[in-house]
């Protein structure tokens, strides 16, 4: 039986994004420049699946994701269906345990996984992540604490971290 991936475009304070879901959960949440390019990328990633554009059916998901962009420290309660290698999934699970408002380094994640010499591989796993914010690769910084690259742009990474840190500071006050 062919897998069905439903997708739709959403708008947020950080730009247009695409959300895609399988029967198990969210498989993609990515910032995009254009809708046609997003559909092509999804088609390549899920080559064996039937892609169905479903803006009406995914409206609650789009609304929840737009809200989490404005407040990335919140959990929208959406089930995730990340697709990757066993190592990538281990990295992504480790990233999900980093509290909102905090950052970690590639080396710290590698050490947490018991592979302290694999900081580069952690970076590659972050680059392969297709579920923005909910798998928080934006919380990973260089060893010296400076910001490093982000698949969806340095500006977005800086803003997401700032939003989380502001929310954390507000909760402490």
Image: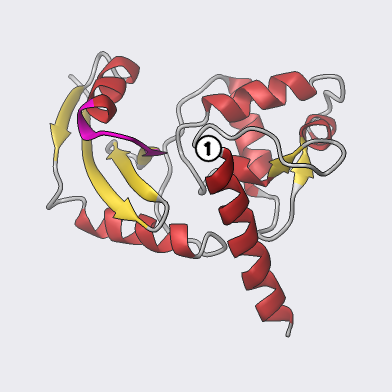
**Which residue reaches farthest front?**
155
The image shows residue 112 at horizontal and vertical percentages of: 81, 36
Task: Describe residue 103's horizontal placement relative to residue 58 as left or right.
Answer: right
Q: What element carries label 1?
A: loop
The image shows residue 106 at horizontal and vertical percentages of: 77, 32
Task: Describe residue 80's horizontal placement relative to residue 102 as left or right.
Answer: left
Rendering colour mode: secondary structure
Viewport quadrant of the N terminus: top left
| Residue for point 51% across, 48% down | 134
| Pointer 1 local density, CA inside 10 Å: few below 14, some 14–19, many at least 20 | few
Task: Describe residue 79's horizontal placement relative to residue 62 as left or right.
Answer: right
**Which residue reaches farthest bottom?**
173
| Residue for point 59% across, 63% down | 163
Identify which residue, 164 or 76, lies in the foreground.
Answer: 164
Question: Does residue 87 show up?
Answer: yes
| Residue for point 70% across, 41% down | 140
44 is within the stretch colored magenta: no
32 is within the stretch colored magenta: yes
Task: Describe residue 62's horizontal placement relative to residue 139 as left or right.
Answer: left
The image shows residue 76 at horizontal and vertical percentages of: 43, 61
The quarter of the displayed image where residue 3 is located: top left
The image shows residue 33 at horizontal and vertical percentages of: 32, 35
Compared with 136, 87 (above or below) is above
Question: Does residue 76 show up?
Answer: no
Q: How many marks?
A: 1
Identify which residue, 58 or 41, lies in the foreground.
Answer: 41
Q: Give the range drawn in magenta.
A: 29-36
Give the residue pinned by disc 1: 153
């Amino acid at each position: 039986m062919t897998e069905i991936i439903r997708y739709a475009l959403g708008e947020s304070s950080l730009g247009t994004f695409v959300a895609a879901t399988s029967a198990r959960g969210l498989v993609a949440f990515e910032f995009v420049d254009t809708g046609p390019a997003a559909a092509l990328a999804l088609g390549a990633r899920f080559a064996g699946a039937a892609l169905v554009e479903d803006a009406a059916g995914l409206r609650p998901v789009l609304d929840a994701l737009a809200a989490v962009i404005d407040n990335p420290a919140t959990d929208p309660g959406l089930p995730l269906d990340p697709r990757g290698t066993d190592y990538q999934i281990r990295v992504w699970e480790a990233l999900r345990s980093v509290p909102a408002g905090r950052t970690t380094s590639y080396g710290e994640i590698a050490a947490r996984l018991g592979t302290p010499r694999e900081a580069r591989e952690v970076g590659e796993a972050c680059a392969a992540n297709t579920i923005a914010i909910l798998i928080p690769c934006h919380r990973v910084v260089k060893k010296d604490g400076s910001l490093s690259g982000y698949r969806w742009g340095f500006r977005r990474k800086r803003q997401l971290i700032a939003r989380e840190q502001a929310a954390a500071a507000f909760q402490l006050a």
